[in-house]
Amino acid sequence: MHIMEGFLPHPWWEIWFLASAPFVIYGVSRINQMTRERREALPLLAVAGAFVFVLSSLKLPSVTGSCSHPTGTGIGAILFGTWITSVLAAIVLIYQAVFLAHGGLSTLGANVFSMGVAGPAAAYLIYRASSRAGLNFYLGVFAATAVADMITYLVTAMQLALAFPSSSGSVLESFWAFSAVFSLTQLPLALLEGVVAALMFKYILQLRGDVLLRLNVLSESALGRLREGLS
Amino acid sequence: MAVNQTGEHSWEGADGQAEDVISDLTNGTYQPWIGSIWEPPSGEVETLFFSIQAAVGGLIIGYFLGYYRRGRLEGAS
């Protein structure tokens, strides 16, 4: 659920542009740095970006009788962190705003913040916490991705609630109204996205576990254990 | 809201439902202050652009995973 064009009044659309701009700007410089210093990881960057492209184009029917789409940002966040993922999300959101009238240019800042900053930041933190706690790698990927998906939509609901408090002036009340629209719709999609991300990481691990090591996604001992499990 | 139990589903996008909530909260007074710069002229054209998005993404994923796979096979031989 992206916020549609024109659906965020002044001053909210400016505020969300200001909030997400630093992430995208710093993300671009991180990508530049990566193209110079870590060329071996560039194919993975392309895959992470393409993953956002594919998943956010799939409008899936859900249990509530309405459709929504996954975000696909979890993989990018786990591999490259929040900064770079915010750039990937911005590219997809601009494409959808210009060619599909899905989301909008005035609401781009808010949409980049929910899909490119809040969701990926949650994914990154959850993945790091789970790997530090020694949890199973695939379980960590699954949880991080699924939660990132839900957080994206909860932040969208919060953004709408801040801009449109209920008639009694309560932001919380309208937050419930907005989150009721999609939280149940989104839950099965979030779980599905988590499973797809875990499978994707299994394949990446088989192909180029060494790149995961160099990106600090996995420690050497964790990589060794996982490789034993695969062979 | 939650789960529709009538057996009748419209399978519409959740975005549209959010617009309905905005309309409820503002008693229908809120008008978008700016419209989309371009809208797909029909559902078919919209589907076209969604398909292009998915196809480009799928191609890139396949190409680079294939690139990695080939590198690994050559490294092994």
Image (cartoon, coloured by chain):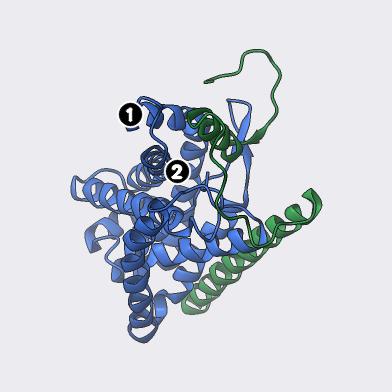
Chain colours: A blue, B green
Vertical comparison of A99 with A46: above or below: above
Task: State the separation of the CA atoms marked 1 and 2.
Answer: 34 Å
Left or right, A21 with respect to B55, comes to left
Specify which label sits upstream in the sequence, 1 or 2.
1
The numbered disc on residue A147 is: none
Position of residue A149 measured from the top left corner of the image (x, y, whole percent): 43, 44
Chain ID, mark 2? A
Q: What element carries label 2?
A: helix
The numbered disc on residue A194 is: 2
Where is mark 1, residue-wise?
Answer: A170
The residue shown at (51%, 35%) is B22
The reply to whether the C-beta atoms of the residues labelled 1 and 2 are less than 8 Å apart is: no
Farthest-out residue, front: B29
Residue B46 appears in view: yes
The residue shown at (69%, 61%) is B38
Position of residue A47 measured from the top left corner of the image (x, y, whole percent): 51, 65
